[in-house]
Amino acid sequence: MPDPNPYTELHADAVATLSRWTATSPAAGAARDRTLALLADGPVAMSRTHRAGHVTASALVLDPDGRVLLCLHGKIRRWMQLGGHCEPADRTLVAAALREATEESGITGLTVEPEPIDVDIHQVACQGGSFHYDVRYAALAPAGAVERVSTESEALGWFPPDRLPEPLAHATAQLVPPALAVLARHAGG
């Protein structure tokens, strides 16, 4: 009999991904451990209906020149990476991050590094007050990519990594060094 929970496969991927991941900082390691504890609640931890908190996926998009694509989020009015809630059709966290980044940037041809670059936990207004356990990836845009603002954003912009806009969302700046390391590996390989 098939599993009635549409998040079962995604949940298994999240547990496997985070169990094998080497954290990029002590804070990311602590957030990974807390996220694995949340995932002990089962597949429901992938759904926004889980009031205790739920896993989300996001991506910091970079172009070949190392510029960072950020969105001015329509609800929180801060600049941040692209991402959001997992959906029942998502089978992996990487796929969820790619879907969100593509939807919110309008850029086709993004590639997402398969290993996370960060995990962050922050309070949000979902379900009257909950937490996002955000698994964050680096995404690379093709040369000449042109962004298109989605309904979730007020604006999109490319920024040099040393001149990010204000106000920034919580923990956005900490994504830049590990994302630039991913870009450097791709440029060198």
Image (cartoon, helix red, strand yellow):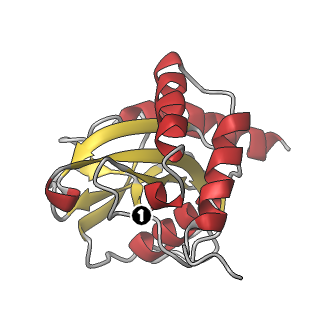
Q: Is residue 15 visible?
A: yes
Left or right of 169 on screen, residue 174: right
13 up-or-down from 39: above or below: below
| Point 20% across, 41% down: residue | 166
Left or right of 1 on screen, residue 11: left
| Point 68% across, 81% down: residue | 2
- Image quadrant in which you'd find residue 85: bottom left
Q: Is residue 147 visible?
A: no
Residue bearing the label numbered 1: 47
Kind of residue at disc 1: Ser
The residue most toward the top is: 26
Q: In the rendering, at what x and y percent does residue 73 appear? A: 23, 60
- Image quadrant in which you'd find residue 1: bottom right
The count of marks equals 1
141 up-or-down from 19: above or below: below
| Point 47% across, 65% down: residue | 86
Q: Residues within 10 Å of mark 1 (few under 14, many from 20)?
A: some
177 up-or-down from 147: above or below: above
The residue most toward the right is: 189
| Point 43% across, 70% down: residue | 105
Q: In the rendering, at what x and y percent does residue 16 appear? A: 71, 46
- Image quadrant in which you'd find residue 162: top left
Element type at mark 1: loop
Q: In the rendering, at what x and y percent does residue 91 appear? A: 64, 69
Q: In the rendering, at what x and y percent does residue 65 appear? A: 58, 49
Left or right of 52 on screen, residue 41: right
Quadrant where the C terminus is found in the figure? top right
The residue most toward the front is: 1
